[in-house]
Amino acid sequence: VDAGTGAMTEPKIIFTGPSARGGHRLVTVNLCPQKYSYVYNLGLEPTEPNEYFTLGTLVHVGLAARYARMRNRQRDLDPDEYADPVTAVSVVAARLGPAAMSQLHWALDAVTEYETHYGDEGFRVEHVEEEFRATVGGHRYTMRFDLVVSRRGRFRVFDHKTQSRFDTE
């Protein structure tokens, strides 16, 4: 509910994509300068998304929802400010289209397995999918960290990765 108007508001979904000036740009220009130019200079994207990148995107959305809700609970804020992981992943898959919808069951399974395995890890969630900046040699770089947590005065930074296929056994 909006505090000012009393109107119902939709829960937030964290769907950020890569950072504006992150390492992925350096990798792309080194691997294929032409692809770099198409994507970053001309703003063109592949017509068919890579199914493994789509799966990774959906899993990231689910984990971001999990940790944003956890952060709010830890700070005595409303966790429902953010969509639950299943809703977040389902909404983003629908937005991305048929290729993402074909990966939806895999993404939901991965997020569920993650939650089952890790449970409540006992740390404080500090940042979820936030962009950090650094200037090196006069050049500005950015990095979007999936998760920054603290425990007993120490910080850990996570960059979640998914594998390109799941074991079937």
Image: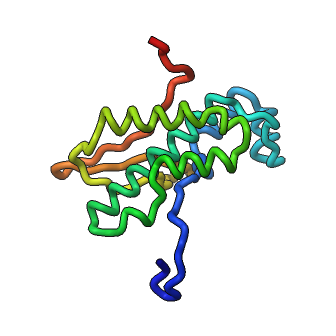
Q: Which colouring convention does the figure follow?
A: rainbow
Q: Locate residue 153 relative to residue 87 in the image: left or right.
A: left
Horizontal and vertical percent position of residue 34: 81, 33
Single out the residue that lies furthest toward the bottom: 4
Single out the residue that lies furthest toward the left: 152
Residue closest to the eye, 104 or 159: 104
Q: Locate residue 89 relative to residue 111 in the image: left or right.
A: right
Can the viewer see residue 154?
yes
Q: Locate residue 89 relative to residue 118 in the image: left or right.
A: right
Q: On screen, 162 above or below 149? A: above
Q: Quadrant where the C terminus lies?
A: top left
Residue closest to the eye, 158 or 87: 87
In the image, what residue occupies the spot 55% across and 20% down?
165
Q: Quadrant of residue 68?
A: bottom left
In the image, what residue occupies the spot 36% across and 49% down?
148
Horizontal and vertical percent position of residue 143: 51, 47
Q: How many marks?
A: 0
Q: Quadrant of residue 3?
A: bottom left
In the image, what residue occupies the spot 42% across and 53% down?
128
Can the viewer see residue 136?
no
Horizontal and vertical percent position of residue 137: 54, 48
Q: Locate residue 113 relative to residue 144 in the image: left or right.
A: left
Q: On screen, 68 above or below 76? A: above
Horizontal and vertical percent position of residue 117: 31, 32
Residue closest to the eye, 6 or 162: 6
Q: On screen, 19 above or below 115? A: below
In the image, what residue occupies the spot 52% across and 62% down?
12
Single out the residue that lies furthest toward the top: 169
